[in-house]
Image (tube, rainbow, N blue to C red):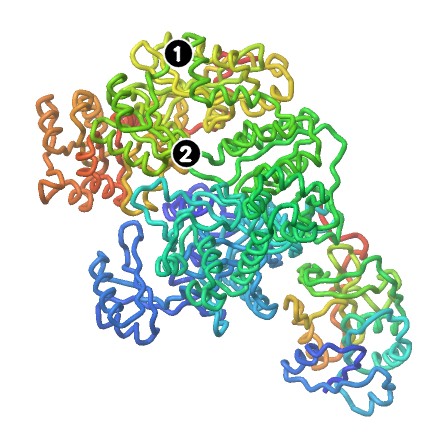
Amino acid sequence: MGGQTALNLTLELAEAGVLDRFGVELIGADIAAVKKAEDRDLFKAAMQKIGLDLPRSSYIHNFEEGIKAGEEIGLPLIIRPSRTLGGMGANIASTQQELEANLEWALDLSPVSEALVEESIAGWKEFELEVMRDRKDNVVIVCSIENLDPMGVHTGDSITIAPAQTLTDKEYQIMRDAALAIIREIGVDTGGSNIQFAVHPGDGRLVVIEMNPRVSRSSALASKATGFPIAKIAAKLAVGLTLDEIRNDITRETPACFEPTIDYVVTKIPRFTFEKFKGAADHLTSQMRSVGEAMAIGRTFKESLQKALRSLEIGSTGLEPPPDDLGREELEEKLRVPNSRRLWYLAEAMRRGYSVENLYEISAIDPWFLTNIEQIVEMESALAATASLEDLSAEDLSAAKRYGFSDLRLAALLGCEEKALRERRHELGIKPVYKTVDTCAAEFEAYTPYLYSTYEEEDEAAPSTKDKIVILGGGPNRIGQGIEFDYCCVHAAFALREAGYEAIMVNCNPETVSTDYDTSDRLYFEPLTLEDVLAIIEREKPKGVIVQFGGQTPLKLAKSLEAAGAPIIGTSPDAIDRAEDRERFLQVVTSLGLLQPPSGIARSVAEAEAVAARIGLPVLVRPSYVLGGRAMEIVHEHEHLRRYMENAIRSSPDHPVLIDKFLDQAVEVDVDAICDGERVVIGGIMEHIEQAGVHSGDSACSIPPPTLDPAIQDGIREQTAALAMELEVRGLMNVQFAVVGPDIYILEVNPRASRTVPFVSKAIGRPLAKIAARVMAGESLESLGFTSEVTPAHTSVKEAVLPFLKFPNVDTLLGPEMKSTGEVMGIDQSFGRAFAKAELAAGNRLPCAGKVLVSVRDEDKAEIKPVAAALREAGMTLLATGGTARFLREAGLECELVNKVHQGSPHTVDALRGGTVAMVVNTSSTPQSIRDSFSMRRAALEAGVPYFTTLAGASAAAEGMVLAKQGRLSITALQDFHASGLQAGSETGE
Amino acid sequence: MIAALDLGLKLNIARCFAGLDCRIAVIGAGSSAEDIRALRPDGLFLSNGPGDPDAVSGAIAVVAELARELPTFGICLGHQILALALGAKTYKMKFGHHGGNQPVIDLASKTVEITSQNHGFAVDGDSLPGDLRVTHMNLNDNTVEGIEHRHLPVFSVQYHPEASPGPHDAAPQFRRFLELIAGPGGGGGDVYDQLPALKDGALGS
């Protein structure tokens, strides 16, 4: 169930003999089946045994073998060097010369002089089948999925459509038969598997790509696409039930032993964040790099595609022309080389007159998909040729809505406002109806209202007359807005159902729990745009709408929803604006007599320099129109400030740049609290491990604060309460503080659920989101029994998980722009142990012996001494670069000297590549030193060596390592921590 | 050689037999028992076809005779006609079964086939005379999907083992027929006799 992480761990446990020692049986798929599916050679043999085809390949050990293999398999070929670090690297050879060059490259790069020469199937059509099997050997296909992007792009990065659209029944049944044979041959006894196939677009040859003997990312998508809960059923199968014995939740009467009927089209589009990783090219490859996805449901591919586009929340409302006006060659390059914007370039090419045949030749995307996109583009030109909104007939508008056009896109094409379009549409009586995802195309009655909109005649799910509250979800996962917000939405739904309301969820993210059909009473799988949300609110007429739980996505809609008459509950949109608007917030802070870092606004280099002169360097600069730390930088030097301003003015002359005094060496603190208007209860005070300047989402943090003075903590409590009462918060609020000596500065206030709510809830054992949802619905904290702060007896540490390994040539340094894609939590009796556990969970295995490479900036040298001493106490020896080594020796700490990279070999990177370094501590501040140490950080990452780019992080790690050395880390269930915490008499609200 | 009574025969049924190296003679729906005997077939196949089986009285009479003489296999309408010929009743269903994903359980092996179906009438399980038994059942609504004779090499299924479009799960039914023809001539064993009554339902909780 836990993806590749769980599977790998299970294999390790089996190999270490742990499972045998404790008599643990694997249920579902056993070790033999997992190995057969995962091991390339075993899998190949298994497929050959049942007569299935794979891409032809062979391992070669020298140049001659490679040439021979090339002749046998035929060009084009993929050449993969064996056993490279991180499994990186593969090149395509389309000509004999390329083959020769790549063979030399691969044999040279492989530490064992081995390479895999494989038939290239790039450009073939790609399909996936989700298969379930029970212990009586019943096998069903839950869903077929087709990738719009042909082979060559990771399926997680591909636009995918369910069900498969371009196969004949004969082709589909051959694939289905193959899937049945594969799950039986691999021997997955019970549960779900995902099987990927490629089909040659010319001759129909079918090859098996791979099989995942577990539930996968695609299983989640397939579950949402069909209403068949794959993981839930797989769990029941694993304990011995059979498919015919399990009921289908949706129909209640019929069993789970069936293949869902799909009378709609589902489109998933991945969401990328290339802009956050400087140096990463927007090229899609077999290495997955998307961070989230949006899914949409429509009656046709066109409708489903256009709904998915606006669900992405990347500012797109449809297939608008790309902002860059590319020449012919550049455009064709964008069509040929897969990238995150290819759909828009395809539409642009069609506008420029490229034919479907031509585009197929360039992109290898199936002509059926291209034809559908062309039909959308053709309708766009017809709409654009319409003189005005009034000239658009009801018939044409209705046809456009059936094609999935958003009101916004139509308004842009017709040159009017969205509101005017919506009013005209309503005047003409054109409104969406809602259909159910019921697994059976209405063959049987459906009891779970899982709905999507379309522009047809019949509505399948009339609203009830109960008291309802609508919860707006967070949309696709992205950096800065992930499943933490979904957690809050899900808990809100649970709490409101408990309180007797009908909970209605709106979201479009298939990876979430909020989009499970049994989380809420009614689920609308819809884009989170004003148009789509308003349509639901107008129809459901809820008592309240919650916009504070889904992150920025619903928050951005708050004002327009309120203007359209939606009953927003909890903190008012105006209070949210008071917290978010810089000027208005300054008034709040001033009236309460609190502190904010000195700041200013600049529209030119001169203005910026004046601000800098007034508040002093270093400063934090950012454009005024972005959120989530985009393009935020810390500036230490005048030259840097000048460069930043010039760039900012060039790229966005209308928006000023915000300049804040950067509080270097400040301790950052996050607070989550709930306010009901009567009282404010602190959920938790989190002290960041990394100093100010690292985005709060990327910084590790701890509850309780390990170093904050109790008086400071009380100050923080008072300020939080004052802000909550002043802003009239009803529900959750998050405040970020920076503490410098005795001074507490307010960095920002977010009167909404924050990223840290699930962490705090788990640390203190109280469901903050649930409590907050009921407060928003009108209950008091007193009636809910949550009246005072919980101080747990244990320590909880949150650590960020970073995706740098997936982005070659990107620096791993942390900064004000958030880059983490996930987080982990460690919990134990002391800070050091909890931190060590969190690092372990994040994949940073803290060593217990070996060398630590230390290279720190001058400002940190004074602080490095206790850290280095602790590291030695933990059993490590020290390796340091020039200045650091000199300092350590002067401080009486023995260390070995190593060259910086620019000082020549053998240097730090050589040491890392040679495997003699077990851990790295590296801090740098000036642009020059950052550049110099870049290759060292990258080498540490690629060698899988834990590295710390802040002294605070290294210090916490050293503390954890010392404690880990002294005694084993304890293993206690979270429930037991909370139970023992309560017994110990810690403060509780009850 | 198999005589295939054409009540609306799908070409793919003929292909499936041919695929098993089996010769078939397609004979018109109006053929008499004599006409069929004259072909000296090794087995009788009753095809699919449209509408209410009760209305096909000629074929029912012919099958009533021949099913006691020849190994017999019916699909869809052929299944209903076999049931009527051997004394069972049929009825009109509320919506019928239509589509390529109908789950059918084999009551002996307890395994499920995903089948393609298209019918509006069904065999009434309670009406089966003592020498017939139910072998297959629809998991969605517990209706009869297959029957066989306890003593004669005679069986039929309501669904389409030859489905195209549709899944291939049920394709082994053709081989089952050929094995009956080649076999010692008895019924399909007693395994289906040991089963609980039909309407107990196969669903757990």
Q: Is residue B2 above or below residue A433?
A: below
What distance separates the C-alpha of mark 2 from that of mark 1? 25 Å
Of residues A735 and A377, the one nearer the viewer is A377
Determine the residue positioned at 33% across, 41% down: A277
Identify residue for label 1: A713
Percent x, y for residue A930?
A: 21, 35
Q: Give the amino acid type for the residue marked by disc 2 in the picture.
A: Glu
Determine the residue positioned at 10% across, 22% down: A892
Q: Give the amino acid type for the residue marked by disc 1 in the picture.
A: Gln
Quadrant of the drawing holding the C terminus of chain A:
top right
Of residues A573 and A384, the one nearer the viewer is A384
Q: How many marks?
A: 2
Could you tell me which secondary element the residue under label 1 belongs to? helix
Which quadrant of the structure image shows residue B190? bottom right
Instruction: Examine the rendering and report whether any part of residue A1 can be seen.
Output: no
Percent x, y for residue A680?
A: 52, 12
Percent x, y for residue B132?
A: 83, 68
Using the image, name the chain to which the residue with label 2 belongs: A
Which quadrant of the structure image shows residue A866? top left
Q: Is residue A551 above or below residue B185?
A: above
Determine the residue positioned at 46% across, 45% down: A271
Of residues B4 and A668, the one nearer the viewer is A668
Using the image, name the chain to which the residue with label 1 belongs: A
Bin the neighbour count of mark 1 within 10 Å (Cα to Cα): few under 14, some 14-19, many 20 and up. Answer: some
Bin the neighbour count of mark 2 within 10 Å (Cα to Cα): few under 14, some 14-19, many 20 and up. Answer: many
Determine the residue positioned at 24% across, 66% down: A103
Percent x, y for residue A915?
A: 20, 44
Identify residue for label 2: A823
